[in-house]
Amino acid sequence: MDSQLARIFELKSQLLDLGYHAFQVDAMQKEILGDAVPEEVGAEKRRQVIDALEKYAYFAIKARHGGGGDMRRYPGPPRK
């Protein structure tokens, strides 16, 4: 499995652990890919999915910590 696909599946699992429902995580991915799946698209589309899922995960983690606390373990999505 390529590293981008592994990252997508890792993030989807993390989002489920953070309390999102499977249909919500699927909708996040579908927003970018439409009816395609990550295995069917190129690297740029996969990068877009990763960026979006990382932002959702960061938001959920930040919300759990009340927007403060020790966020050093969770530096947030990569800056461009």
Image (cartoon, rainbow, N blue to C red):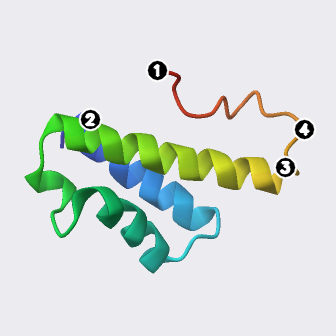
Q: Residue furthest top?
A: 80
Q: Residues within 10 Å of mark 3 (few under 14, many from 20)?
A: few
Q: Judging from the image, what secondary structure is the residue with disc 1 in?
A: loop
Q: Is residue 9 above or below residue 35?
A: above
Image position, residue 27 (x, y; %): 39, 70
Q: Which three-letter amino acid code belongs to the residue tagged 4?
A: Gly
Q: Could you tell whether 43 is left or right of 16 in the image?
A: left
Q: Judging from the image, what secondary structure is the residue with disc 4 in?
A: loop
- Pick whichever of labels 2 and 4 is earlier in the sequence: 2
The CA distance from mark 1 to mark 2 is: 20 Å
- Regarding residue 51, the answer to whether it shows in the image is yes
Give the residue at mark 4: 69
In front: mark 1 or mark 2?
1
Q: Judging from the image, what secondary structure is the residue with disc 3 in?
A: loop
Q: Residues within 10 Å of mark 4 (few under 14, many from 20)?
A: few
Q: Are marks 1 and 4 in contact (CB under 8 Å)?
A: no
In front: mark 3 or mark 1?
1
Give the residue at mark 2: 3
Q: Which three-letter amino acid code belongs to the residue tagged 2?
A: Ser
Q: Which three-letter amino acid code belongs to the residue tagged 3?
A: His
Give the residue at mark 3: 65
Q: Could you tell whether 53 is left or right of 75 in the image?
A: left
Q: Are marks 3 and 4 in contact (CB under 8 Å)?
A: yes
Mark number displayed over residue 22: none
Q: Which three-letter amino acid code belongs to the residue tagged 1?
A: Lys
Q: Quadrant of residue 22?
A: bottom left
- Pick whichever of labels 1 and 2 is earlier in the sequence: 2
Q: Are marks 3 and 1 in contact (CB under 8 Å)?
A: no
The residue positioned 15% from the left and 63% from the top of the image is: 36
Q: Judging from the image, what secondary structure is the residue with disc 2 in?
A: helix
- Regarding residue 7, the answer to whether it shows in the image is no
Q: Residues within 10 Å of mark 1 (few under 14, many from 20)?
A: few
